[in-house]
Image (tube, rainbow, N blue to C red):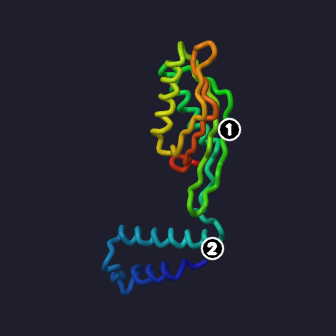
């Protein structure tokens, strides 16, 4: 197939020999700029063909609930470096498709126990976890429903922590 008309017209008008040792040239662009211009034109043609064939890159992939859970678990694991001893008792992640007025989001619900010497230390570890989540660019909302000290006094239990996040604000939202 011949090149697209716009590219062929440009190359015909700026390349080739007119007479012996007299060549056509682009009076506005140097050689490097000509190559850059042609590369841009080719990329535009490729995008146009991809769009015509239905290979549209503008169509965003849904956010990954697994990726959302992974980020939460990574932060929970990081609290161990501060001496926390978290124990996950329940975790569930769901993807919620956005609308014209609201963006896509991932909701993670979890029950966690922070084992510690006493409820105060468990609360300190939980608050550290909360601050780390809230400091993330993907964080939207953090809601713990109930926090109770353990019966033996060795930590706290947090039921139904609801974390809403925008996974598209992470480095790789779909993996």
Task: Measure the alpha-carbon separation of dots 1 and 2.
Answer: 40 Å
Q: Residue at x 57, y 79 (%)?
A: 2
Nearer-the-camera pick, 31 or 82: 82
- Residue of label 1: 92
Mark 2 crowd level (few <14, some 14–19, many ≥20, 10 Å Cα): few
Question: Please, what secondary structure does the residue beneath circle 2 have?
Answer: helix
Q: Residue 20, position in %: x, y?
A: 36, 84
Q: Which residue is drawn at 57% across and 44% down?
A: 164
Question: Please, what secondary structure does the residue beneath circle 1 have?
Answer: strand
**Vertically, is 51 above or below 86?**
below
Q: Residue 73, position in %: x, y?
A: 58, 32
**Vertically, is 137 above or below 47?**
above
Q: Which residue is drawn at 59% across and 58% down?
A: 60
- Residue sticking out furthest to the bottom: 19
Nearer-the-camera pick, 145 or 39: 145
Mark 1 crowd level (few <14, some 14–19, many ≥20, 10 Å Cα): some
**Vertically, is 10 above or below 138?**
below
**Mark 1 or mark 2, earlier in chain:** 2
Q: In which quarter of the image is the N terminus?
A: bottom right
Nearer-the-camera pick, 74 or 119: 119
- Residue of label 2: 52
Q: Quadrant of the C terminus?
A: top right
Nearer-the-camera pick, 152 or 39: 152
């Amino acid at each position: 197939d011949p090149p697209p008309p716009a590219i062929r017209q440009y190359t015909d008008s700026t390349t080739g020999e007119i007479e012996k040792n007299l060549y056509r040239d682009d009076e506005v662009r140097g050689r490097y700029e000509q190559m850059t211009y042609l590369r841009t034109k080719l990329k535009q043609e490729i995008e146009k063909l991809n769009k015509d064939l239905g290979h549209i890159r503008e169509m965003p992939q849904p956010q990954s609930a697994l990726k959302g859970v992974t980020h939460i678990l990574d932060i929970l694991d990081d609290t161990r470096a501060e001496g926390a001893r978290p124990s996950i008792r329940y975790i569930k992640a769901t993807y919620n498709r956005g609308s014209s007025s609201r963006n896509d989001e991932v909701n993670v619900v979890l029950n966690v126990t922070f084992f510690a010497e006493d409820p105060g230390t468990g609360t300190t570890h939980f608050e550290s976890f909360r601050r780390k989540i809230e400091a993330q660019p993907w964080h939207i909302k953090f809601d713990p429903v109930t926090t109770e000290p353990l019966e033996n006094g060795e930590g706290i239990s947090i039921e139904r922590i609801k974390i809403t996040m925008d996974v598209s604000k992470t480095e790789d939202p779909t993996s």
